[in-house]
Image: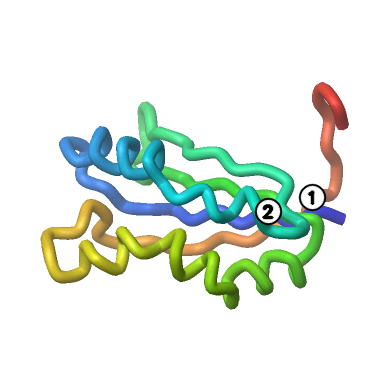
Amino acid sequence: MSVVKINAIEVAPERGPELEERFAKRASEVEKMPGFEGFELLRPVSGETRYFVYTRWESEEHFQAWVKSEAFTRGHAQAAKDRGEKPVAHGSAVLAFEVVERVGAGS
């Protein structure tokens, strides 16, 4: 059963394009990890102010291996660098789900 992790990131509206650019230039480390199934960056629209970073994994163990990996550290190097400057995000929360049912092309 797949698991989904969503990082809900608070970003000031005027900083959204900067966040999107950073993700477009990201290190792409996550795609190389065993058990990785997908990634999406979701831009907020009406009624929501947070960006959602959506990842899907084969298992919780695969996700935990990613979080504990050197690749995770490399993939988040830019965020760590920003801590000394004015960060793009000003809060985040990780939401976790198990996929109960999936419908779509290729599923």
Foreground of the two, 31 or 17: 31
Pick out the residue farthest to the left.
85
How far apart are labels 1 and 2 at the CA level?
A: 7 Å
Q: Secondary structure at mark 1?
A: loop
Pick out the residue farthest to the top.
105
Residue shown at 35% from the left, 64% from the top: 77
Left or right placement of residue 87 versus residue 58 in this view: left
In the figure, residue 3 lies in which quadrant? Answer: bottom right
Left or right placement of residue 30 versus residue 38 in this view: left
Check whether the beta carbons of the residues at disc 1 and disc 2 lie within 8 A of each other.
yes
Per the rendering, the mark at residue 4 is 2
Q: Position of residue 53 (x, y in %)?
A: 49, 47
Q: Position of residue 102 (x, y in %)?
A: 83, 37
The crowd level at tag 1 (other Cα within 10 Å; few <14, some 14-19, many 20+) is: few
**Quick check: 105 above or below 62?**
above
Q: Position of residue 11 (x, y in %)?
A: 27, 48
The answer to which of marks 1 and 2 sits earlier in the sequence is 2
Residue shown at 21% from the left, 62% from the top: 82
In the figure, residue 58 lies in which quadrant? Answer: bottom right
Left or right placement of residue 15 versus residue 32 in this view: left
Residue shown at 73% from the left, 46% from the top: 37
Kind of residue indicated by mark 2: Val
Q: Which residue is labeled 1 in the image?
A: 99
Q: Position of residue 105 (x, y in %)?
A: 82, 22
In the figure, residue 97 lies in which quadrant? Answer: bottom right
Foreground of the two, 54 or 85: 85
Per the rendering, the mark at residue 85 is none
**Which quadrant: the N terminus?**
bottom right
Q: Secondary structure at mark 2?
A: strand
Q: So how many labels did they put on this image?
A: 2
Residue shown at 87% from the left, 32% from the top: 107
Kind of residue indicated by mark 1: Val
